[in-house]
Image (cartoon, helix red, strand yellow):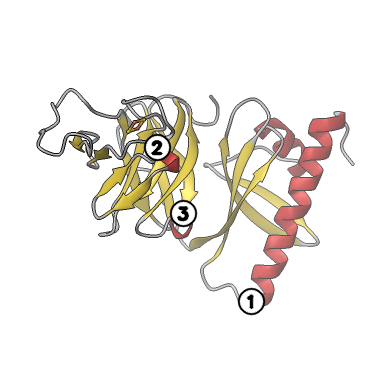
Amino acid sequence: MPPYPTGSWMPVALSADLPAGTVMPAQSPAGPIALWRSHSGRAAAFADRCPHRGMRLSHGFVRGETLSCIYHGWSYAQAGNCLRIPAHPALTPPDTIRVATQPVEDGGGIIWISVGEPAAGPPRFEGLAPLRSMMVEADVAALEAAAGTKIGEGLLDYTHNSRTIRLLLAPEGQARTLMHVLVDEDSNPAELIATSRAAEALRRAAEHISLTGIAR
Ligand code: FES
């Protein structure tokens, strides 16, 4: 799934959007994931399906260093193995009961999951910091068309009202893209607002192209 082929890292969320002790749904090329952060601050990515009866683990809750399913309370360690089955408190769950996990890297304000087995860590964008994420109902090609340029070195540049903003894109399915907006680390509040508005303008333009096939 371009632009994240096997052997790369995909930016699935901003670190700030996943506080300690929370879980959220996200998408990877392998399917839906439950992205969660333990109370000590470590992020993990599970397949979003409980091995017991298939409940979405992104509906679950974090307790300490475990993620518990909302349905019958089975609890899983970050390595994916089941630690506790409340209906059988004396039982040590067999190691075969486990959730599929995906490697996670949390750095530079961005949470990445690996697509396949990358040879190196995820990219770092020196001097840039994440501002916000937004979902765009359009594919990467529509975003590139709206921006009038192609992704280069992992980022899409978009110039709006004399301001160039930098975007990190994560495709979600056929016509949906999660867009992370990056800003210069030393941006002032007015620049942050202008960058955010420029990103919203790009989103509208890309969604218009996606709907009509025509640039504004
Ligand atoms: S479906 Fe998850 S514990 Fe039963």
x and y percent of residue 171 in the render? 58, 34
**Relative to residue 86, is residue 20 depicted above or below?**
below
Do the CB atoms of the residues marked 2 and 1 lie less than 8 Å apart?
no
Q: Nearer the viewer, mark 2 or mark 3?
A: 2
Three-letter amino acid code at disc 2?
Leu
Q: Which comes sooner in the sequence, label 2 or label 1?
A: 2
SS under mark 3: loop
Q: State which quadrant residue 72 falls in.
A: top left
x and y percent of residue 195 in the render? 68, 63
Mark 3 lies on residue: 125
Q: Nearer the viewer, residue 76 or 208?
A: 76
Mark 3, other Cα within 10 Å: few <14 / some 14–19 / many ≥20: some
Say which residue appears at 69% left-offset and 31% top-offset. 141
x and y percent of residue 59 in the render? 45, 42
**Relative to residue 158, is residue 70 depicted above or below?**
above
SS under mark 1: helix
Three-letter amino acid code at disc 3?
Phe
The verdict on label 2 being within 8 Å of ligand 1 is yes
Mark 1 lies on residue: 189
Residue 123 appears anywhere in the view = no
